[in-house]
Amino acid sequence: MPILRLVLPYPPSILNPNNRSHWAKKNPVKVRYREHCRALALSMAPTFPPGKIPLSIVFYPPRNTGDLDNMLSSCKALFDGVSDAWGVNDKLFRPMTLDVGKADKANPRVEITIGETHQLR
């Protein structure tokens, strides 16, 4: 499988699972974020062989707060948008390796490498 890289915006804070906002307030943000991620992923238009799609995900949050499991949970709309764009079921996104890079207030993002797993350095 060829190695591809996709850089997507960091999820809005309202999508954090610890955010207690009402669902009616969260939903429009979630829908916009999912659609934005879908549009960015559509530009790649990769094709995949049947089976698992290995992903390496590195989070570059705006601040040095939060933990890895909440960062991943905040990205549900991201993965839904990417899987919509590529026409694959997101349950095929495995194995999945996760890491957190340095906080980047100027450019918070989620970098996804498709086709290999991240090697910690």
Image (cartoon, rainbow, N blue to C red):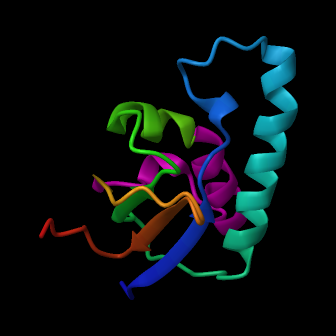
Q: How many marks?
A: 0
Q: Quadrant for the C terminus, please.
A: bottom left
* Picture quadrant of residue 69: top left
Q: Residue at x 70, y 60 (%)?
A: 37
Residue 85 shown in magenta? yes
Identified at 78% across, 15% down, the residue is: 23
Front residue of this view, candidates 8 and 76: 8
**Within the image, what quadrant is residue 86 found in?**
bottom right
> What residue is rendered at 87% in x and 33% in y?
28
* Magenta stretch in the rendered image: 76-98
Q: Would you say the magenta stretch is mainly helix, strand or loop? A: helix
Residue 6 shown left or right of residue 117 in the figure: right
Q: Within the image, what quadrant is residue 119 found in?
A: bottom left
Position of residue 74 in the picture relative to residue 71 (left or right): right
Q: Is residue 86 magenta?
A: yes
Left or right of 80, for residue 42: right
Residue drawn at point x = 69 percent, y = 29 percent? 14
Taking the image as drawn, is residue 16 in sight?
yes
